Amino acid sequence: MKTMALKLKELAWTDITAPTKEGLTQLSQETGIPLRPLLDCLDPELLPKYELFDDKTFIMLRVMLPQNAAKNASLEKITTKIGLFHTPQGLITVHRLDPDFFAEIRKSVNEKPGELDPKEFLKRLFSGVLASYDPMLTALEKRIDSFESLIFGEKKTDSLIKQGYLLRRRLSTMKKIIKMTIDVLAKIGSRSEMRWNDFQDLKDEAESNLFYADDDLENLNSLLNLHVALASHKTNEASYRTNEIMRLLTVFSIFFLPLNFIAGVYGMNFKFMPELDWKWGYAIVLGIMATVAGSLFYWMWARGWLARPEDDQRKAS
């Protein structure tokens, strides 16, 4: 665990990187901060929240990591946590990774110790967190456009539906984080000492991010439903063609079954078959076959078996 002591205006700032359970336990004993919220900083799935403990305040935020989001959708893979504790002794920040904007804040405080106002510190912290959502939202919007092109393209991959649901998981995770961050901002803003114009601007920015995330998620859900519908339509077309072939084969079999029966009877090699000696036997049998075939044709036509399904729908309309 790496600890760095810094100085804000009238307030001490302790920055802790790569925390450990043992180090946080010792910190709890030294500062009087309850151990449970400190250990929450080690929970990889902890969502943004705001808690009060007597004269101590605990704020948990999550920062997007676009470089890790290309092949991941889980909360711990695409975000990192920043825990903030406000105590009578000063501010304490706890985080595993070091986002660029946070390193810039620390650098500016190191260069000019004691000049940065705590409110300005909070503003920069929240601004950096909210700004981290913008590249991810932009990247996801482009991927949604590509996903739409693939749906309407001629070449479709088997993994297309998997890509769509992976995108939906990322957007759903982002929407959840942004919404809970807005809740944190609302709780902080309810405190009289935290009501200032810049803070309202931060809340408006967070609500704007939520709007875009919600809009992208809705568009993606529509595209996924469309993809499933198109796939079902394609399957139905294949089933329809198969059914048409089977219908045609069935019609032919109905015609030829009785004719094959008659031909089979007179193809038997029995000595005493009187019809074999008839002068007009051949013509009579052909006439019977034609009569049977005609009767079958009329019977199937009367029942509508020879009409295509679309013809029936046309007549019905």
Image (cartoon, rainbow, N blue to C red):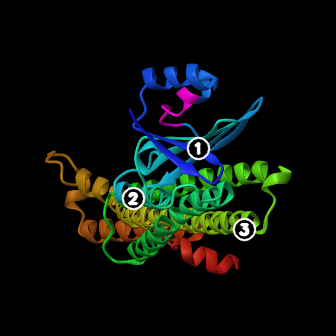
- Nearest to the observer: residue 103 or residue 132: 103
Q: How many marks?
A: 3
Label placed on residue 136: none
Q: CA distance from mark 3 to mark 2?
A: 39 Å
Q: Which residue is mark 3?
A: 198
Q: Residues within 10 Å of mark 3 (few under 14, many from 20)?
A: few
Of pointers 3 and 1, the one earlier in the residue sequence: 1
Of pointers 3 and 2, the one earlier in the residue sequence: 2
Q: Quadrant of residue 36?
A: top right
Q: CA distance from mark 3 to mark 1?
A: 23 Å
Query: Under tag 1, what secondary structure?
Result: strand
**Looking at the image, which residue is at 66% across and 42% down?**
49
- Residue type, label 3: Asp
On screen, 247 above or below 62?
below
**Looking at the image, which residue is at 34% across and 54% down?**
71
Give the left or right position of residue 168, taking residue 313 as reference: left
Query: Under tag 3, what secondary structure?
Result: helix
Give the left or right position of residue 196, taking residue 209 as reference: right
**If the image is split into quadrants, where does the N terminus sit?**
top left
Q: Are marks 1 and 2 in contact (CB under 8 Å)?
A: no
Q: Which residues are magenta?
A: 38-45
- Nearest to the observer: residue 127 or residue 109: 109
Q: Which residue is mark 1?
A: 12
